[in-house]
Amino acid sequence: MKALLALEDGTVFEGQSFTGPGEVFGEFVFNTGMSGYQEVLTDPSYKGQIITMTYPLIGNYGVNDEDMESFQIHPEGFIIKEYNAIPSNFRSTGTLADFLIKYGILGIEGVDTRALTRHIRVAGAMKGVISTIDLNRDSLITKAKSSPGLLGRDLVKEVTCDTPYGWAGNTAITGDNFSTAAPGNYKVVVIDYGLKFNQARLLAERGCRVQIVPAGTSAQTILAMNPDGIFLSNGPGDPAGVAGVVETVRELLGKKPIFGICLGHQILGLAYGGSTYKLKFGHRGANQPVKDLTTGKIEITSQNHGFCVDIDSLDKDHVEVTHVNLNDKSVEGMRHKLHPAFSVQYHPENAPGPHDSVYLFDRFIEMMNK
Protein backbone atom coordinates (compact mmCIF):
# COMPACT_ATOMS: atom_id res chain seq x y z
CA MET A 1 0.00 0.00 0.00
CA LYS A 2 1.66 3.23 -1.18
CA ALA A 3 2.33 5.93 1.39
CA LEU A 4 3.69 9.47 1.19
CA LEU A 5 5.64 11.33 3.87
CA ALA A 6 5.46 15.11 3.61
CA LEU A 7 7.42 17.61 5.72
CA GLU A 8 6.43 21.19 6.39
CA ASP A 9 9.36 22.47 4.30
CA GLY A 10 7.91 20.80 1.19
CA THR A 11 10.10 17.68 1.15
CA VAL A 12 8.28 14.46 0.23
CA PHE A 13 9.36 10.81 0.55
CA GLU A 14 7.66 7.65 -0.70
CA GLY A 15 7.14 4.35 1.06
CA GLN A 16 4.66 1.52 1.66
CA SER A 17 2.51 0.80 4.68
CA PHE A 18 2.97 -2.59 6.35
CA THR A 19 0.15 -1.98 8.86
CA GLY A 20 -2.76 -0.95 6.64
CA PRO A 21 -4.26 2.45 5.73
CA GLY A 22 -4.02 5.63 7.74
CA GLU A 23 -2.98 9.25 8.05
CA VAL A 24 -1.03 10.64 11.01
CA PHE A 25 0.67 13.89 12.00
CA GLY A 26 3.66 14.57 14.22
CA GLU A 27 7.18 15.91 14.53
CA PHE A 28 9.60 13.84 12.44
CA VAL A 29 12.62 12.65 14.45
CA PHE A 30 15.22 9.88 14.13
CA ASN A 31 16.55 7.26 16.54
CA THR A 32 20.08 5.86 16.06
CA GLY A 33 19.62 2.62 18.01
CA MET A 34 20.46 -0.66 16.25
CA SER A 35 17.95 -2.52 18.41
CA GLY A 36 15.36 -1.80 21.08
CA TYR A 37 12.51 -0.79 18.78
CA GLN A 38 9.87 -2.14 21.17
CA GLU A 39 11.23 -0.09 24.07
CA VAL A 40 11.36 2.94 21.77
CA LEU A 41 7.75 2.46 20.67
CA THR A 42 6.51 2.12 24.26
CA ASP A 43 8.47 5.13 25.56
CA PRO A 44 5.89 7.86 26.42
CA SER A 45 8.50 10.53 25.63
CA TYR A 46 7.76 9.94 21.92
CA LYS A 47 4.17 11.17 22.18
CA GLY A 48 3.45 13.62 19.34
CA GLN A 49 6.36 12.38 17.22
CA ILE A 50 6.90 10.17 14.17
CA ILE A 51 10.04 8.04 14.56
CA THR A 52 12.52 7.17 11.85
CA MET A 53 14.86 4.30 12.72
CA THR A 54 18.31 4.78 11.20
CA TYR A 55 19.20 1.08 11.40
CA PRO A 56 17.83 -0.37 8.12
CA LEU A 57 16.38 -3.75 9.18
CA ILE A 58 13.65 -3.66 11.82
CA GLY A 59 11.36 -6.39 13.14
CA ASN A 60 13.85 -9.26 12.98
CA TYR A 61 13.44 -10.31 16.64
CA GLY A 62 9.72 -9.62 17.02
CA VAL A 63 8.09 -8.31 20.21
CA ASN A 64 7.24 -9.69 23.66
CA ASP A 65 5.44 -8.66 26.84
CA GLU A 66 8.63 -8.35 28.90
CA ASP A 67 10.09 -5.45 26.89
CA MET A 68 7.13 -3.10 27.35
CA GLU A 69 8.21 0.24 28.84
CA SER A 70 4.63 1.46 29.35
CA PHE A 71 1.11 0.15 28.87
CA GLN A 72 0.92 1.02 25.14
CA ILE A 73 2.62 2.53 22.06
CA HIS A 74 3.00 6.34 22.08
CA PRO A 75 4.55 7.65 18.83
CA GLU A 76 2.13 8.73 16.11
CA GLY A 77 3.92 6.76 13.37
CA PHE A 78 6.91 4.52 12.67
CA ILE A 79 9.24 4.73 9.64
CA ILE A 80 11.78 2.08 8.65
CA LYS A 81 13.84 1.06 5.64
CA GLU A 82 12.99 -2.63 5.55
CA TYR A 83 10.49 -4.62 7.62
CA ASN A 84 11.27 -8.22 8.58
CA ALA A 85 7.92 -10.00 8.79
CA ILE A 86 9.37 -13.31 10.06
CA PRO A 87 11.05 -12.74 13.44
CA SER A 88 13.60 -15.21 14.78
CA ASN A 89 14.14 -15.02 18.54
CA PHE A 90 13.31 -17.38 21.39
CA ARG A 91 11.69 -14.52 23.34
CA SER A 92 9.42 -13.41 20.50
CA THR A 93 5.67 -13.77 20.99
CA GLY A 94 4.49 -11.73 18.00
CA THR A 95 5.46 -9.63 15.01
CA LEU A 96 6.15 -5.92 14.93
CA ALA A 97 3.38 -5.39 12.35
CA ASP A 98 0.75 -7.03 14.55
CA PHE A 99 2.03 -5.03 17.53
CA LEU A 100 1.60 -1.73 15.66
CA ILE A 101 -1.81 -2.74 14.31
CA LYS A 102 -3.00 -3.67 17.82
CA TYR A 103 -2.41 -0.09 18.99
CA GLY A 104 -3.52 1.59 15.75
CA ILE A 105 -0.06 2.90 14.78
CA LEU A 106 0.84 3.47 11.14
CA GLY A 107 4.07 1.73 10.09
CA ILE A 108 5.85 2.60 6.83
CA GLU A 109 8.72 0.77 5.13
CA GLY A 110 10.67 1.22 1.90
CA VAL A 111 11.61 4.78 2.83
CA ASP A 112 15.10 6.10 2.18
CA THR A 113 15.71 6.54 5.90
CA ARG A 114 19.31 7.58 5.35
CA ALA A 115 18.21 10.52 3.17
CA LEU A 116 15.40 11.40 5.58
CA THR A 117 17.76 11.38 8.57
CA ARG A 118 20.34 13.50 6.75
CA HIS A 119 17.61 15.98 5.84
CA ILE A 120 16.47 16.27 9.47
CA ARG A 121 20.07 16.70 10.63
CA VAL A 122 20.54 19.61 8.21
CA ALA A 123 17.11 21.25 8.36
CA GLY A 124 16.12 20.22 11.89
CA ALA A 125 13.19 18.24 13.28
CA MET A 126 9.97 19.50 11.77
CA LYS A 127 6.26 18.88 11.51
CA GLY A 128 4.98 16.40 8.96
CA VAL A 129 2.36 13.89 7.90
CA ILE A 130 2.28 10.28 6.68
CA SER A 131 -0.68 9.16 4.60
CA THR A 132 -1.90 6.24 2.54
CA ILE A 133 -5.24 8.01 2.06
CA ASP A 134 -4.23 11.36 0.57
CA LEU A 135 -1.50 10.92 -2.05
CA ASN A 136 -1.60 14.50 -3.32
CA ARG A 137 1.78 16.03 -2.51
CA ASP A 138 0.62 19.65 -2.38
CA SER A 139 -2.31 18.72 -0.14
CA LEU A 140 -0.05 16.83 2.28
CA ILE A 141 2.47 19.66 2.49
CA THR A 142 -0.35 22.07 3.36
CA LYS A 143 -1.56 19.65 6.06
CA ALA A 144 1.96 19.32 7.44
CA LYS A 145 2.35 23.09 7.74
CA SER A 146 -0.97 23.48 9.56
CA SER A 147 -0.48 20.53 11.96
CA PRO A 148 0.27 21.21 15.64
CA GLY A 149 3.93 21.25 16.67
CA LEU A 150 5.45 20.52 20.06
CA LEU A 151 6.22 24.04 21.28
CA GLY A 152 3.90 25.08 24.08
CA ARG A 153 1.85 21.85 24.01
CA ASP A 154 1.09 19.94 27.18
CA LEU A 155 1.64 16.35 26.08
CA VAL A 156 2.19 15.11 29.62
CA LYS A 157 -1.56 15.16 30.29
CA GLU A 158 -1.95 12.63 27.46
CA VAL A 159 0.51 10.07 28.90
CA THR A 160 0.44 10.44 32.71
CA CYS A 161 -1.49 7.88 34.77
CA ASP A 162 -5.11 8.66 35.69
CA THR A 163 -4.86 7.28 39.22
CA PRO A 164 -1.98 6.40 41.55
CA TYR A 165 -0.52 2.91 41.43
CA GLY A 166 2.40 1.05 42.94
CA TRP A 167 5.21 -1.14 41.69
CA ALA A 168 6.59 -4.38 43.09
CA GLY A 169 9.39 -6.30 41.40
CA ASN A 170 8.44 -6.30 37.74
CA THR A 171 4.74 -5.63 38.16
CA ALA A 172 2.44 -2.64 38.44
CA ILE A 173 0.05 -2.98 41.38
CA THR A 174 -3.14 -1.09 42.10
CA GLY A 175 -3.74 1.02 45.14
CA ASP A 176 -1.51 2.48 47.84
CA ASN A 177 1.85 0.73 47.86
CA PHE A 178 3.01 2.63 50.95
CA SER A 179 0.31 1.22 53.23
CA THR A 180 0.91 -2.42 52.25
CA ALA A 181 3.24 -4.88 53.91
CA ALA A 182 5.44 -4.95 50.80
CA PRO A 183 9.14 -5.03 51.72
CA GLY A 184 11.26 -1.97 51.10
CA ASN A 185 13.63 0.30 52.98
CA TYR A 186 12.69 3.52 51.20
CA LYS A 187 9.39 5.07 50.22
CA VAL A 188 9.70 6.81 46.84
CA VAL A 189 6.99 8.86 45.18
CA VAL A 190 7.36 8.83 41.40
CA ILE A 191 5.71 11.75 39.62
CA ASP A 192 4.57 10.31 36.30
CA TYR A 193 5.26 12.70 33.43
CA GLY A 194 5.49 9.71 31.06
CA LEU A 195 7.25 7.05 33.12
CA LYS A 196 9.28 4.23 31.58
CA PHE A 197 8.73 1.06 33.58
CA ASN A 198 12.44 0.27 33.95
CA GLN A 199 12.83 3.31 36.19
CA ALA A 200 10.33 1.74 38.60
CA ARG A 201 12.01 -1.66 38.24
CA LEU A 202 15.43 -0.29 39.17
CA LEU A 203 14.05 1.57 42.17
CA ALA A 204 12.28 -1.59 43.37
CA GLU A 205 15.48 -3.62 42.91
CA ARG A 206 17.20 -1.19 45.30
CA GLY A 207 14.77 -1.72 48.13
CA CYS A 208 12.28 1.02 47.33
CA ARG A 209 8.55 0.89 47.80
CA VAL A 210 7.38 2.80 44.77
CA GLN A 211 4.20 4.86 44.58
CA ILE A 212 3.48 6.37 41.16
CA VAL A 213 1.23 9.44 41.07
CA PRO A 214 -0.27 11.55 38.24
CA ALA A 215 1.66 14.59 37.03
CA GLY A 216 -0.93 16.97 38.46
CA THR A 217 -0.58 15.71 42.05
CA SER A 218 0.00 18.63 44.43
CA ALA A 219 3.11 19.11 46.56
CA GLN A 220 0.96 18.96 49.69
CA THR A 221 -0.44 15.55 48.71
CA ILE A 222 3.02 14.19 47.95
CA LEU A 223 4.53 15.46 51.21
CA ALA A 224 1.58 14.07 53.17
CA MET A 225 2.65 10.62 51.97
CA ASN A 226 5.92 11.18 53.87
CA PRO A 227 8.24 9.69 51.25
CA ASP A 228 11.97 9.26 51.73
CA GLY A 229 12.55 10.57 48.21
CA ILE A 230 10.81 11.97 45.16
CA PHE A 231 11.52 10.81 41.61
CA LEU A 232 10.67 12.94 38.55
CA SER A 233 10.18 10.74 35.49
CA ASN A 234 10.81 11.27 31.81
CA GLY A 235 8.05 12.52 29.53
CA PRO A 236 7.21 14.07 26.16
CA GLY A 237 7.33 17.50 24.59
CA ASP A 238 8.01 21.02 25.75
CA PRO A 239 8.58 21.33 29.53
CA ALA A 240 7.43 24.94 29.44
CA GLY A 241 4.04 23.79 28.16
CA VAL A 242 3.21 21.48 31.08
CA ALA A 243 0.78 23.28 33.35
CA GLY A 244 1.52 23.55 37.08
CA VAL A 245 4.37 21.06 37.42
CA VAL A 246 7.19 23.58 37.82
CA GLU A 247 5.43 25.25 40.75
CA THR A 248 4.85 21.84 42.36
CA VAL A 249 8.53 20.85 42.08
CA ARG A 250 9.61 24.25 43.39
CA GLU A 251 7.48 23.63 46.49
CA LEU A 252 9.13 20.22 46.97
CA LEU A 253 12.70 21.51 46.73
CA GLY A 254 14.51 21.21 50.05
CA LYS A 255 11.74 19.13 51.61
CA LYS A 256 12.84 15.70 50.34
CA PRO A 257 15.68 14.30 48.18
CA ILE A 258 14.79 14.61 44.47
CA PHE A 259 16.11 12.72 41.43
CA GLY A 260 14.95 13.78 37.95
CA ILE A 261 15.37 12.14 34.54
CA CYS A 262 14.80 13.63 31.07
CA LEU A 263 11.65 15.81 31.30
CA GLY A 264 12.00 15.61 35.09
CA HIS A 265 15.49 17.10 34.66
CA GLN A 266 14.11 19.93 32.51
CA ILE A 267 11.32 20.66 34.98
CA LEU A 268 13.89 20.84 37.77
CA GLY A 269 15.86 23.33 35.65
CA LEU A 270 12.76 25.51 35.33
CA ALA A 271 12.09 25.14 39.05
CA TYR A 272 15.65 26.37 39.72
CA GLY A 273 14.75 29.54 37.81
CA GLY A 274 16.36 28.54 34.52
CA SER A 275 14.95 28.23 31.03
CA THR A 276 14.81 25.58 28.30
CA TYR A 277 15.18 25.68 24.53
CA LYS A 278 14.45 23.36 21.59
CA LEU A 279 17.39 21.48 20.09
CA LYS A 280 17.78 21.42 16.31
CA PHE A 281 17.12 17.68 15.97
CA GLY A 282 17.41 16.35 19.52
CA HIS A 283 19.29 13.38 20.96
CA ARG A 284 17.66 10.00 20.38
CA GLY A 285 19.43 6.65 20.49
CA ALA A 286 21.57 4.39 22.64
CA ASN A 287 25.02 5.68 21.75
CA GLN A 288 25.25 9.26 23.07
CA PRO A 289 28.58 10.11 24.78
CA VAL A 290 28.31 12.03 28.06
CA LYS A 291 31.06 13.19 30.42
CA ASP A 292 30.56 13.13 34.18
CA LEU A 293 32.35 16.29 35.28
CA THR A 294 32.49 15.11 38.90
CA THR A 295 34.57 12.01 38.06
CA GLY A 296 35.96 12.72 34.58
CA LYS A 297 34.51 9.44 33.32
CA ILE A 298 32.75 9.03 29.96
CA GLU A 299 29.42 7.23 29.73
CA ILE A 300 27.67 5.96 26.62
CA THR A 301 24.02 6.74 27.23
CA SER A 302 20.50 6.12 26.02
CA GLN A 303 18.70 9.37 25.18
CA ASN A 304 15.38 10.67 23.90
CA HIS A 305 14.76 14.39 24.13
CA GLY A 306 14.24 17.41 21.90
CA PHE A 307 14.52 20.16 24.53
CA CYS A 308 17.42 21.15 26.78
CA VAL A 309 18.17 23.27 29.86
CA ASP A 310 20.02 26.49 29.01
CA ILE A 311 23.36 26.49 30.87
CA ASP A 312 23.55 30.29 30.94
CA SER A 313 20.11 30.59 32.54
CA LEU A 314 21.16 28.76 35.72
CA ASP A 315 22.34 30.53 38.87
CA LYS A 316 25.91 29.20 39.21
CA ASP A 317 25.88 29.96 42.96
CA HIS A 318 23.03 27.52 43.46
CA VAL A 319 23.26 25.00 40.61
CA GLU A 320 26.26 23.00 39.40
CA VAL A 321 26.44 21.35 35.97
CA THR A 322 27.58 17.74 36.52
CA HIS A 323 27.33 16.17 33.05
CA VAL A 324 27.75 17.46 29.48
CA ASN A 325 27.06 15.98 26.06
CA LEU A 326 30.35 15.42 24.22
CA ASN A 327 28.77 15.99 20.81
CA ASP A 328 27.32 19.46 21.35
CA LYS A 329 28.35 20.39 24.95
CA SER A 330 24.71 20.73 26.05
CA VAL A 331 23.73 20.17 29.71
CA GLU A 332 23.22 16.49 30.53
CA GLY A 333 23.20 16.67 34.32
CA MET A 334 23.08 19.09 37.24
CA ARG A 335 22.76 19.21 41.01
CA HIS A 336 21.55 21.83 43.45
CA LYS A 337 24.24 23.07 45.85
CA LEU A 338 21.85 23.92 48.70
CA HIS A 339 19.12 21.28 48.39
CA PRO A 340 19.33 17.47 47.97
CA ALA A 341 18.37 17.41 44.30
CA PHE A 342 20.10 16.17 41.16
CA SER A 343 19.08 15.19 37.65
CA VAL A 344 20.25 13.98 34.26
CA GLN A 345 18.93 14.68 30.78
CA TYR A 346 19.57 11.15 29.51
CA HIS A 347 18.08 7.77 30.49
CA PRO A 348 20.24 5.93 33.05
CA GLU A 349 17.59 3.22 33.28
CA ASN A 350 18.61 2.17 29.71
CA ALA A 351 15.89 -0.06 28.17
CA PRO A 352 17.18 0.02 25.53
CA GLY A 353 20.78 1.05 25.80
CA PRO A 354 24.00 0.60 27.75
CA HIS A 355 24.08 0.24 31.52
CA ASP A 356 26.90 2.76 32.08
CA SER A 357 24.72 5.15 34.09
CA VAL A 358 22.74 2.82 36.37
CA TYR A 359 24.96 4.03 39.24
CA LEU A 360 22.80 7.18 39.42
CA PHE A 361 20.01 5.17 41.05
CA ASP A 362 22.52 4.16 43.73
CA ARG A 363 23.35 7.84 44.19
CA PHE A 364 19.68 8.49 44.83
CA ILE A 365 19.64 5.75 47.49
CA GLU A 366 22.72 7.29 49.14
CA MET A 367 21.03 10.69 49.14
CA MET A 368 17.96 9.24 50.91
CA ASN A 369 20.27 7.68 53.52
CA LYS A 370 21.74 11.03 54.58
Image (cartoon, grey):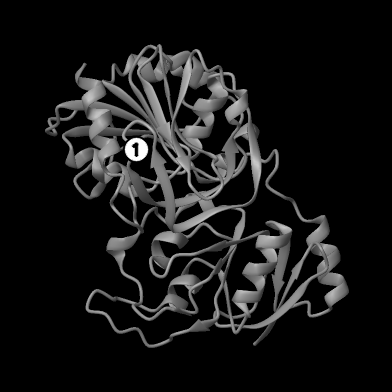
Q: Quadrant of residue 15?
A: bottom right
Camera-side residue: 112 or 317? 317
Q: Position of residue 119 (x, y in %)?
A: 70, 67
* Residue 360 drawn above or below residue 146: above
In the rendered image, the quadrant that contains the N terminus is bottom right
Q: Residue at x 31, y 44 (%)?
A: 357
User: Is the C terminus in the top left, top right, bottom left or bottom right quadrant?
Assistant: top left
Classify 10 Å Cα crowding around label 1: few (below 14), some (14-19), many (20 and above): few
Looking at the picture, how far across and down is residue 220, in whole percent?
Answer: 43, 14
| Residue 178 in sight | no
Q: Nearer the viewer, residue 56 or 211?
A: 56
Q: Could you tell me which residue is drawn at 55 percent across and 59 percent down?
A: 75
Location of residue 211 by image quarter: top left
Image position, residue 218 (x, y; %): 47, 20
20 relative to 67 in the view: left or right = right
- Residue at the outermost front position: 296
Residue 153 appears in the picture as rendered: yes
User: Which image quarter: residue 208?
Assistant: top left
At horizontal 54% and vertical 76% (from top left) the residue drawn is 80
Label 1 SS: loop
Residue type at tag 1: Gly
Residue 188 screen position, x and y as percent: 28, 28
Total numbered circles: 1
Q: Is residue 122 above or below residue 254?
A: below
Q: Vertical placement of 100 versus 367: above or below?
A: below
Badge 1 is on which residue? 296
